């Protein structure tokens, strides 16, 4: 499943409630069906750490690091890549 974030967030992804809705209504159901989820950041120029945290932290907490075999991040500018790495590293360390 490809989730194109731009139409949900605009060019700057910052609203935690939007991230939560995407997580609950799209990511978790797809993962529970065994699908690979592609989070497509095409057209998004920036995001906040809290948006990314809200988007994926509960999933990492529940499923652990193996969830990264089924979640992909695509079309991320370097600033977004950096935030994703910060959040994913933190969550993996905190679940040990």
Image (cartoon, rainbow, N blue to C red):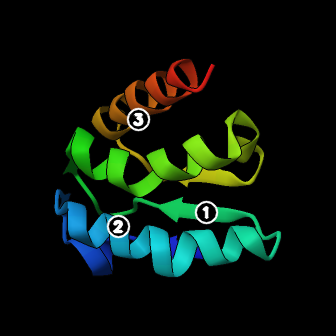
Is residue 9 placed above or below 77 in the rendered structure?
A: below
Q: Say which element carries label 3.
A: helix
Give me the disc on residue 20.
2
> Would you say residue 1 is visible in this rendering?
no
Q: Position of residue 64 (x, y in %)?
A: 68, 38
Q: CA distance from mark 1 to mark 3?
A: 14 Å
Which residue is found at the position 54% from the left and 50% from the top?
73
Where residue 86 sits, quadrant-wise, is: top left
Q: Position of residue 44 (x, y in %)?
A: 27, 59
Is residue 3 placed above or below 13 in the rendered structure?
A: below
Q: Position of residue 2 (x, y in %)?
A: 60, 73
Q: Nearer the viewer, mark 2 or mark 1?
A: 2
Is residue 82 placed above or below 10 in the rendered structure?
A: above
Q: Please identify the quadrant where the N terminus is shown.
A: bottom right
The earlier-in-sequence mark between 1 and 3 is: 1
User: Which residue has dot 1 on it?
Assistant: 38
Q: CA distance from mark 2 to mark 3?
A: 20 Å
Label 3 near label 2: C-beta < 8 Å?
A: no
Q: Say which element carries label 1.
A: strand
Residue 20 left/right relative to 26: left
Say few, some or many: other residues with alpha carbon within 10 Å of mark 2 (under 14 / 14 to 19 / 20 or more): some
Which residue is found at the position 74% from the left and 54% from the top?
70
Label 3 near label 1: C-beta < 8 Å?
A: no
Say few, some or many: other residues with alpha carbon within 10 Å of mark 3 (under 14 / 14 to 19 / 20 or more): some
Which residue is found at the position 49% from the left and 50% from the top?
58
User: Which residue has dot 3 on it?
Assistant: 81
Q: Please identify the quadrant where the C terminus is shown.
A: top right
């Amino acid at each position: 499943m490809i989730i194109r974030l731009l139409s949900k967030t605009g060019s700057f992804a910052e609203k935690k409630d939007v991230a939560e809705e995407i997580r609950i209504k799209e990511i978790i159901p797809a993962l529970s069906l065994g699908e690979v989820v592609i989070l497509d950041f095409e057209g998004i120029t920036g995001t906040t750490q809290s948006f990314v945290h809200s988007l994926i932290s509960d999933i990492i907490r529940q499923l652990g690091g193996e969830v990264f075999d089924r979640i992909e991040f695509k079309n991320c500018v370097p600033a977004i890549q950096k935030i994703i790495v910060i959040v994913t590293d933190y969550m993996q360390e905190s679940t040990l």
